[in-house]
């Protein structure tokens, strides 16, 4: 409450919102103008349904990539695929993707030369091929159930920690989790060549494909939805060849993720109510960079 006023009393002192001046008011006093500065939803971002659907396509295709990778591993584990044939297909896809990446890059300034890219690929393939017999026996003393559980947790961690806002290059936590899960699964394959092929596929799916997809989103926006749809169809189709019920569940999950969740987001956005006023923390708007020199 303010200072007392009555007959013969001095004129009331107006309250001022300052800290450096003593006033005849309690510390928690506010006047009637307090709520006049109330503002609602001044920084709320309005979403459009199809724009949100387009962005969720990145999440859906990443889930489908994991499903496609697991399908490939299951086929190799059952002997339905020859590792040498899979390796040649991976090599062809890698060369095709690299060429497309360079074409979409156009006149962009390259941070690495093509020779450096070739050296990195050669070193990775050489070390992976050399250590494949070691990786094959890496989890021999671990039970199969434990290996499968670790792989499931690591692939789930890959999906959760994947940098969907900036997927190129993939985040270190996401990529390491995916490669760790791939090593666990590859160690359960019949031979060293199977292990080498599986790790090469893991690098292609979890490391190189996100970089190409990010370049497509930047340079050829029209191609990104088609690429995401094709990957989702491949993931559902591949899983359907092994487990039809699982493919149905995956399809329902992808439809919910890409169509239902954006609808809920847009619908709930109308009920958003953020209030701002004099009780907010002070924001320093002045450029303080000169004090950092």
Image (spheres, helix red, strand yellow):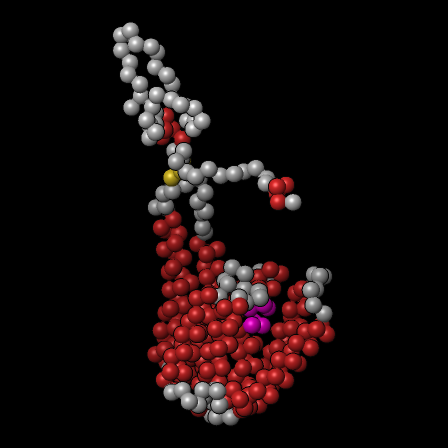
Q: Is residue 155 visible?
A: yes
Point out the image quarter for the N terminus: top left
Percent across and percent down for residue 29 are 33, 27
Percent across and percent down for residue 216 are 59, 64
- Image position of 267 (left or right of 162): left
Percent across and percent down for residue 199 are 54, 82
Name above or below for residue 79 compared with residue 167: below
- The answer to whether residue 175 is magenta is no
Question: Which range is magenta?
Answer: 207-212
Percent across and percent down for residue 41 are 41, 41
Tell me the chief SS of the magenta region: helix
In-front residue for pair 234/157? 157
In-front residue for pair 33/86? 33
Point out the image quarter for the C terminus: top right
Name above or below for residue 87 compared with residue 40: below
In-front residue for pair 138/252? 138
Q: Is residue 235 visible?
A: no
In-front residue for pair 127/122? 127
């Amino acid at each position: 409450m303010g200072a007392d006023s009555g007959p013969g009393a001095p004129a009331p002192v107006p309250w001022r919102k300052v800290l450096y001046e003593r006033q005849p008011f309690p510390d928690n006093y506010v006047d009637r103008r307090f709520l006049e500065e109330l503002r609602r939803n001044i920084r709320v971002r309005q979403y459009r349904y199809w724009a949100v659907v387009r962005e969720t396509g990145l999440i859906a295709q990443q889930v489908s990539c994991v499903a496609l990778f697991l399908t490939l591993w299951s086929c190799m584990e059952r002997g339905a695929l020859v590792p040498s044939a899979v390796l040649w297909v991976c090599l062809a896809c890698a060369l095709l993707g690299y060429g497309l990446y360079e074409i979409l890059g156009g006149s962009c300034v390259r941070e690495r030369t093509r020779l450096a890219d070739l050296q990195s690929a050669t070193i990775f393939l050489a070390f992976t091929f050399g250590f494949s017999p070691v990786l094959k026996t890496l989890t021999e003393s671990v039970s199969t159930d434990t290996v499968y559980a670790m792989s499931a947790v690591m692939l789930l961690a890959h999906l959760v920690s994947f940098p969907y806002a900036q997927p190129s290059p993939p985040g270190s936590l996401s990529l390491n989790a995916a490669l760790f899960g791939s090593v666990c699964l590859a160690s359960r394959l019949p031979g060293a060549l199977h292990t080498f092929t599986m790790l090469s596929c893991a690098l292609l799916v979890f490391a190189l494909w996100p970089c190409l997809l990010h370049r497509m989103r930047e340079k050829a926006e029209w191609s990104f939805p088609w690429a995401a749809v094709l990957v989702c169809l491949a993931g559902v189709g591949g899983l359907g060849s092994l487990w039809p019920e699982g493919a149905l569940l995956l399809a329902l999950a992808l439809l919910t993720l890409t169509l239902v969740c954006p609808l809920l987001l847009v619908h709930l956005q109308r009920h958003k109510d953020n209030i701002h006023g004099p009780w907010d923390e002070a924001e320093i708007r002045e450029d303080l960079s000169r004090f950092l020199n």
